């Protein structure tokens, strides 16, 4: 990992360190996955994090630590290495970094709270704390479906400052949509969803380019056409919030493998809300994960019984604004991970919530399968037929 040079290294405000009762240094806040604890029997690590307050350059930090601990006779390279280790771990920012010229003062004010949250979760060394926001501003995203999940994801991405968002949706607004699809109002009944969505999203953030089309995805060729027909440089991610046709996730998996496009899919099934995150060439693909999950679970079915008897399908998916909003928020969060790298995640997984058991971890992860019909050896460019 390349660690950027810092003009004036500073421990991130959200990662401010403190000393424990036994003299150790805790840094990175008390959030699991961020914080760390460092043994400090001689006390100089604490001096180091205190000196990294943004008022000194790197040489000044090293000199201050050496000055305050003369009896230890600390080698300057050791102090510099400890500072480099903290930087590589993601706890340090450059207090001397110039504001990014690409972001206007208005945008910096608008996204200031977003920047601090991403800085808190970001454990990747950056030349500027604004870099993830810049990556999001430059991003191009294709979103399929703008109902409950997709509408919430679109709203959150546009509010967060995504650069370009293209939405695809074939349906019109119906009364039964309004319990969970919160971009729509009663006066939108009978109106194409895409028209109402575009008006709402453009009013939310005029700095984001939001486009859309009323179109139904009937097969993998339609998906491939949508990906190919985007901005000149292509899309950075596909977000799938459509649940029909039933094979659409398989189609998305194959088409994204063939095009090398990162993608995520989200939805709800009763009280279960989840999102899957996939990057071609890294970790399991959607079919690897699905097949591993089928092998893992034991439904104890009698011979000849279909698995639908254990998890019956209904004409519609029971949902409300909470389950739709949570799944859409998770989909937008997955997009930020894919586009900005915050937080870092190994793709090829699915995670979410079980609203019946708050706090119960819901996660599926599997190894990439060499015999996978989608991403196995010699299959990466395979495209499914419409019936696959």
Image: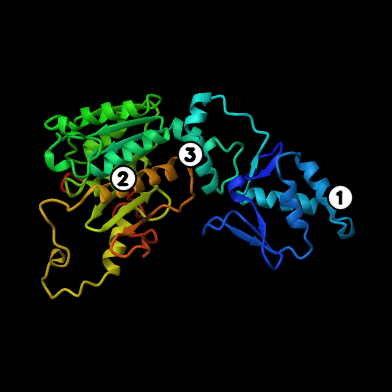
Judge whether residue 372 can be spotted in this image: no
> For the residues marked 3 and 2, what is the alpha-carbon distance in whole angstroms?
18 Å
Residue 341: give x, y in percent of width and height. Answer: 48, 44
Q: Is residue 107 above or below residue 252?
A: above
Disc 2 designates what residue?
A: 328
Question: Where is residue 322 shown, x and y percent of the image?
Answer: 27, 50
Left or right of residue 216: residue 84: right
Q: Secondary structure at mark 1?
A: helix
Q: Quadrant of residue 72?
A: bottom right
Residue depicted at 39% across the width and 61% down the height: 367
Q: Closer to us: mark 3 or mark 2? A: 3
Q: Marks 2/1: CA distance?
A: 53 Å
Q: Secondary structure at mark 2?
A: helix
Tell me where residue 369 appears, x and y as whole percent.
36, 60
Residue at x-position 17% and y-position 45%: 244
Residue 283 seen: yes
Label 3 residue SS: helix
Q: Residues within 10 Å of mark 1 (few under 14, many from 20)?
A: few
Report the residue marked by disc 1: 67
Q: What is the count of numbered marks?
A: 3
Dot 3: few (<14), some (14–19), or many (≥20) neighbours within 10 Å?
some
Percent coordinates x, y for residue 324 in the rendering: 26, 47
Residue at the spot of label 3: 114
């Amino acid at each position: 990992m390349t660690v950027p040079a810092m003009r004036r290294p500073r421990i991130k405000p959200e990662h401010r360190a403190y000393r424990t009762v036994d003299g150790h240094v805790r840094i990175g806040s008390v959030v699991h996955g961020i914080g760390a604890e460092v043994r400090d029997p001689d006390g100089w690590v604490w001096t180091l994090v205190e000196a990294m307050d943004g008022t000194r350059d790197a040489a000044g930090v090293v000199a201050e630590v050496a000055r305050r601990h003369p009896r230890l006779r600390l080698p300057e390279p050791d102090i510099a290495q400890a500072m480099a280790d903290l930087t590589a771990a993601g706890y340090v920012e450059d207090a001397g970094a110039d504001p990014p010229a690409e972001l206007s003062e208005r945008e910096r004010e608008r996204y200031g709270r977003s920047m601090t949250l991403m800085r808190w979760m970001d454990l990747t060394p950056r030349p500027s704390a604004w870099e993830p926001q810049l990556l999001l501003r430059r991003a191009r995203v294709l979103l399929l479906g703008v109902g409950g999940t997709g509408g919430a994801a679109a709203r959150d991405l546009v509010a967060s400052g995504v650069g370009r968002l293209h939405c695809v949706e074939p349906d019109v607004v119906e009364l039964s949509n309004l319990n969970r699809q919160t971009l729509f109002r009663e006066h939108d009944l009978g109106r194409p969803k895409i028209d109402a969505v575009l008006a709402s999203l453009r009013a939310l953030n005029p700095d984001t380019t939001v486009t859309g089309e009323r179109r139904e995805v009937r097969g993998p060729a339609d998906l491939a056409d949508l990906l190919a027909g985007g901005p000149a440089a292509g899309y950075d991610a596909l977000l799938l919030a459509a649940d029909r046709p039933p094979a659409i996730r398989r189609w998305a998996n194959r088409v994204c493998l063939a095009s090398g496009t990162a993608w995520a899919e989200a939805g709800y099934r009763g009280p279960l809300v989840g999102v899957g995150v996939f990057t071609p060439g890294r970790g399991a693909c959607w079919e690897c994960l699905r097949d591993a999950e089928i092998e893992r679970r034991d439904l104890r079915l009698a011979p000849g019984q279909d698995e639908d008897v254990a998890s019956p399908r209904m004409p519609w998916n029971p949902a409300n604004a909470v389950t739709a909003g949570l799944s859409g928020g998770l989909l937008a969060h997955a997009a930020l991970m894919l586009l900005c790298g915050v937080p870092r995640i190994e793709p090829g997984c699915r995670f979410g919530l079980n609203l019946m058991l708050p706090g119960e971890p819901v996660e599926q992860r599997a190894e990439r399968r060499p015999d996978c019909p989608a991403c196995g050896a010699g299959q990466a460019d395979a495209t499914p037929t419409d019936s696959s």
